[in-house]
Amino acid sequence: MNSMTHTHGGQTLLGMGKGRLRVAVTVVLTGLFLLVPVYAGVAGDSYSLILFGRVLVFALAAVGLNFALGYGGMVSLGHAMYLGLGAYTVAILSHHGVNSGVVHLLAVGAVTAVLAVPVGFIALRTQGIAFIMITLAFAQMLFFVFVGLKQYGGDEGLTIAELSGFGALTANKTALYLSMMVALGLALALLRRVVASRFGLVLRATRINERRVRAVGTSPLGYRLVGYVMSAELCAVAGYFLANLTAFASPAYMAWTVSGELIVMVLLGGTGTLVGPVVGAAVFLLLEEGLKALTDHWMAIMGPVIVLIVLFLKDGLWGLLGDGESGKGGH
C-alpha cells in the first residue's frame, strides 16, 4: 500500500513538473515572438517581421484546424479554402473601395459562416475517407472558382492597394504583427475555455465514439457542426491577417497542398493540444526557411525529417513536455 502511495505521489509530482515545463516553454516562446519586432526595429530587418508574421498566421490557422481535427476527429483536407476566403474577402472589398478594418473582419466572419455551415452539414453526414474527400472537393471547387474570376486577377491573384484601415495603425507592420500575436493569444484562451466546457466534453466524446454519444441522448451533429464552423472561422481570420501582411490574395492560398501543410503542422506540434499547433507551425516554417537557404533540394531533407518526427513522436513535439494524451484538453 505504501509503495502504491509513493508511486502515485511520484507520478503526481512528475505531472506537476511537466505542467510547469509547458508553462515555462510557453512563456519563453511568447517572449521570443515579442522580441522579433524589437530586433526588426533595431536592425532594420523588415524581413524577419514578415517571416515571423507568417509563422503567426499559419499558427492561428493550425490552431483552428486542430480544434476540428484534434478535438473533434474531423480530418479536413479543405481548410485552406477558409484561409484563402479570408484573404479574398479583404482583397475584394478593398478592390471596391471598402477599406474599414472592422468591416473587413465582420465580412470575413459572415462569408465564412455562409460557406462553412452548408459544407460542414454535408461533410459531417459522412465519416473517415468520405469526409476527407468531400472537404477536399469543396476546397478544389472554390480554388477553381477564384482561378476563373479574371476581374479579380484569376490565377495571378489580386494585389491589395488599400489594406484594412485602422487609422494611424494602417499599413504599420509592427502593429499588424502585434495584432496577430493578440489574435493568436485570444484564440488559445477561447479554445481553452471551450475545450473545458460541456460543449468541449461532448465534442471530444464524439471523436472517440459517436454511437455512445447518441446512446446517452445527445445528437453529435450539432456539436460537430459548431466545432467545424468555429475551426473554419479561425482559419479565415488567419487569412484576413495573411492578406494584410502580404498585401495580396491568391488562389494558391486555397490549394490542397496548403491544407496538407496545415495538417502536418498540427501533427508536428501535437493533435489535441492547445499550444502544440503553434510549435508545429513555427518548426515547419522556420525549418523550411533554413533548408531553403542551404540547398535547392531542401524538400529531400525536410520530408524525411517530418516523417521521422511524426513516426517516433506520436504525440508531437509538444507531447515531449507532458503526458501527451491527445484530445483530453492538454495545454
Image (cartoon, rainbow, N blue to C red):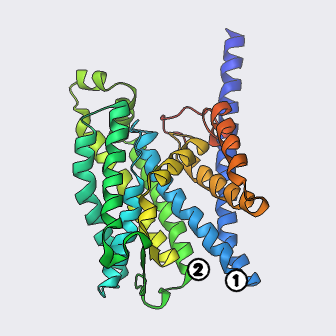
Determine contact: label 2, label 1, CB under 8 Å: yes
The percent position of residue 21, horizontal first and vertical second, equals 70, 44
Image height of 18 relative to 171, above or below: above
Q: In the image, what residue occupies the spot 35% across and 40% down?
A: 133
Image height of 100 relative to 89, above or below: below
Which element is circle 2 on? helix
Which residue does the numbered mark 2 point to in the structure image? 174
The percent position of residue 51, horizontal first and vertical second, equals 63, 69
| Relative side of 222 to 59, left or right | left
Q: In the image, what residue occupies the spot 44% across and 49% down?
A: 65
The amino acid pointed to by label 2 is Thr
N-term-proximal mark, 2 vs 1:
1
The amino acid pointed to by label 1 is Gly
Which element is circle 1 on? helix
Q: Quadrant of the N terminus?
A: top right
Q: How crowded is mark 2: few (under 14 residues within 10 Å), some or many (20 or more)?
A: some
> Residue 41, labelled with which disc?
1
Could one spot residue 63 in this view of the protein? Answer: no
